[in-house]
Amino acid sequence: MKFNRNILTELERCYSVACMDINEKPYAFFASEGHFGCYAFSCSDYTEAKTVWEQPGGTMSIVKVPGKKGEFLAGQKFFKMFDWEEAEMVWVKTLDDGSFSVKTMLKMPYLHRFDILQRNGKNYFIGCTLASAKNAKDDWSNPGSVYVGELPEDESGELILTELRNDFFKNHGYERVTWEGLECGMVSCDSGVYIVTPPSSDADAWSVEQIMSQPVSDIACIDIDGDGQPEIATIEEFHGSYFRVYKMIDGEYRQIFEHPEVSEFYHVAASGKINGNPVFMGGCRRGKQQLFILTHNKETAKIEIHTVDENAGPSNAMIVNLADRDIIISANREIGQAAIYEIEP
């Protein structure tokens, strides 16, 4: 594979990425974790740009609202180090004139990752806090929590949350997964990896199942070798030095791959499909600062590495399957760039 980089804009501390339609056309969204903005670029030729907001910044997550055109949830005011007490979540709508309305839905200290899961026609919110309180950057004495609740129909409704777990230290990683046929949240923290499943009805409860027990910072899941069972990619430990892949063997997850570069601050762990084939994607903010793709070679039964870029220092990235091609949207945080990589087979 060959990857061609397109720099869309310079954005200091570029951190979050997403892709969704505006007026029936796909746009790539980039937001800063600093006191900077959020911007959207047309995926057709990248020439159309929209400003979602200039301030306040501090965006950790952007999540499309299912069934709502041009509407999404986003985090704000989650700033660097341990200055996160004012973190909040907003509901953003695309207006007819192409501008955006932003309404605060939730104020929650240390709200880091969140998502919308669907089951039986309902939208459920899941939110993960990195900690409950911090007195310094390296203070991890207070655990984070997982909050859940039914998402209201629109931004005028009330989001009522229940604390599902409050014992997840360094509660950092998240990916939406299909697990045993259901849309679930995969949450990773210092005590391992958990599957969080929405209830089957109003009378039932959410479930939490632990599937791995080692400290994990970030997580991704896909059946990379096509055997019908999902493999799991991890960054270990918190903001860790190792990017690894695990496979279920004899009833437990066993390591089958480790990226050869051992360097602090791996941060990207994602999954998707390129040219119709399942892949993992990883990235590191130190060392060679690579963004890379992992594929499975069926002939050798080995995982192979494809370097997308170096000296980029990505914080988050995602694979997008457009109608005519596949692209990678990457927040190259360490060089302050919003980038899209065109993929050639």
Image (spheres, rainbow, N blue to C red):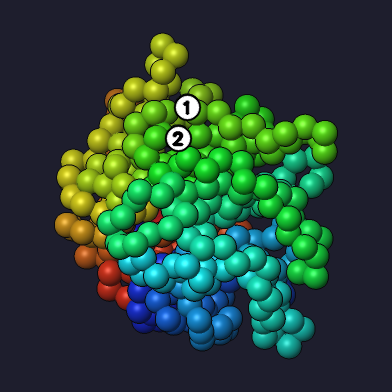
| 187, above or below 103, in the image | above
Residue drawn at 57 percent across, 63 percent down = 108
Q: Which amino acid does label 2 sit on?
A: Val
Residue 44 visible somewhere in the drawing:
no
Q: Nearer the viewer, residue 191 or 101?
A: 191
Q: Nearer the viewer, residue 150 or 54?
A: 150
Circles 2 and 1: CB atoms closer than 8 Å = yes
Q: Mark 2 points at which residue?
A: 193
Image spot of residue 238 (x, y percent) = 31, 47
Residue drawn at 28 percent across, 32 percent down = 257
Going by the picture, which residue comes out furthest to the top? 250
| 233, above or below 324, in the image | above
Q: Label 2 to label 1, Cα distance in Å?
A: 6 Å
Q: What residue type is labelled 1?
A: Ile
Q: Nearer the viewer, residue 192 or 32?
A: 192
In the rendered view, does 13 fall on the left or right side of 152? Answer: left
Residue 168 visible somewhere in the drawing:
yes
Quarter of the image for residue 70 reads bottom right
Disc 2 is placed on an element classified as: strand
In the rendered view, does 328 fall on the left or right side of 2? Answer: right
Sequence order check: which comes first, mark 2 or mark 1? 2
Residue 211 disc label: 1
Residue 48 disc label: none
Image spot of residue 324 (x, y percent) = 57, 60
